[in-house]
Image: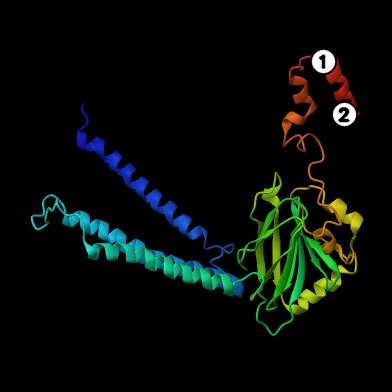
Amino acid sequence: MTIPRSGAAAPVRSRGRHGWALLALGACALLLAGCGEISILRPAGPIGEGNRQILLNSLAVMLVIVVPTMIATLAFAWWFRAGNPKAKYRPEFTYSGRIEVIVWSIPILTILFIGGLIWYGSHELDPFKPLDSDEPTLEVQVVSLDWKWLFIYPEAQVASVNELVIPVGRPVRFRITSASVMNTFFIPNLGSMIYAMNGMETKLYLQADREGTFYGQSAHYSGDGFSGMNFDVRAVPEAEFSAWAVGLKAAGPVLNVETYRELSRQSRDVLPYTYSHVQGGLFESVVDQTLPPGPGPESGRGGAEEIHPESSPEASAEQPAPAAAPASASAHGAHHEG
């Protein structure tokens, strides 16, 4: 029995409809992905709010150009269709002053508007600019390590690893450096990503206006343990912050030169922990490299064998032996290895 052609076509149309539905669902999921708690679109402080406003303003300026352009494309395609007798065919047309004015004025105005937004944001949201507040500014010294973050509170002389605790409604001045490769310090809900660089110090002012636990991260690839180089930011009331700082002094290890050198060794997926006391001037010693940078890889040509398998004894045994070298060269190599 022959199946009618109409019956065979129905599943194809059904699959097509399902495909478009899945595509639309995927697009909606992508649009909503940025609306979670870890998002620059849900700011928790004045700098984050300013960053979001610049983003939305820039989007509005670009949409003023993109939307009319898309509409004009459809309108021109419809008007100059082959079946429209009202559309004039002018193959001799070469120049129109009015069209030139329109074509050039639109990008010029776009550049002026976006340039104004950039100028405003560069000055108003300058990372080095202190925040206006009646509350005293809290200083936190930040050191980027492999692969963890060290936060030092010089006023309380305590420190934490992979956990940042700040009081709500109080400006925080971050002094940031790196004891390893270049990195970036970023708390999406609070705003303003900034680099942490070896042998240099950068500053960043942020503030949390509401309580909560926010996500902080390294946003610059820095090696094999980069994926675990994240930290929690707990914004708590002032009284709770003071109690937390005092509680750290009760027990815990001391952060001095010896413990810092151990901390600077490469480690992955480090759980948060704290120090009950910090040796004075430790951060400054890291910046001016009185305390040297972290040791980096500790085995093999490039570090651990799982990162560079060719440095392992098994891989070396599989490689063919090199050709015999002249006697003088062999003697020189033996001297160098010794």
Q: Which of pointers 2 and 1 lies earlier in the amino acid sequence?
A: 1
Q: Farthest residue toward the bottom?
A: 134
Q: Is residue 335 visible?
A: yes
Q: Residue at x 86, y 57 (%)?
A: 290
State which quarter of the image contains the C terminus.
top right
Q: Position of residue 85 (x, y in %)?
A: 8, 55
Q: Position of residue 326 (x, y in %)?
A: 82, 15
Q: Closest to the observer: 182 or 231?
A: 182
Q: Is residue 253 visible?
A: no
- The local crowd at label 2, few if under 14, some if 14 to 19, many if 20 or more residues have their Cα within 10 Å, is few
Return the residue at label 2: 336
- The local crowd at label 1, few if under 14, some if 14 to 19, many if 20 or more residues have their Cα within 10 Å, is few
Q: Closest to the observer: 327 or 34?
A: 327
Q: At numbered mark 2, what does the secondary structure look like: helix, strand or loop?
A: helix
What is the spatial separation of the Cα atoms under label 2 and label 1, in whole angstroms? 15 Å
- Left or right: residue 285 compared with residue 39: right
Tell me which amino acid carries mark 1. Answer: Pro
Q: Farthest residue toward the left?
A: 85
Q: Where on the picture, by quarter, is residue 242?
A: bottom right
Return the residue at label 1: 326
Tell me which amino acid carries mark 2. Answer: His
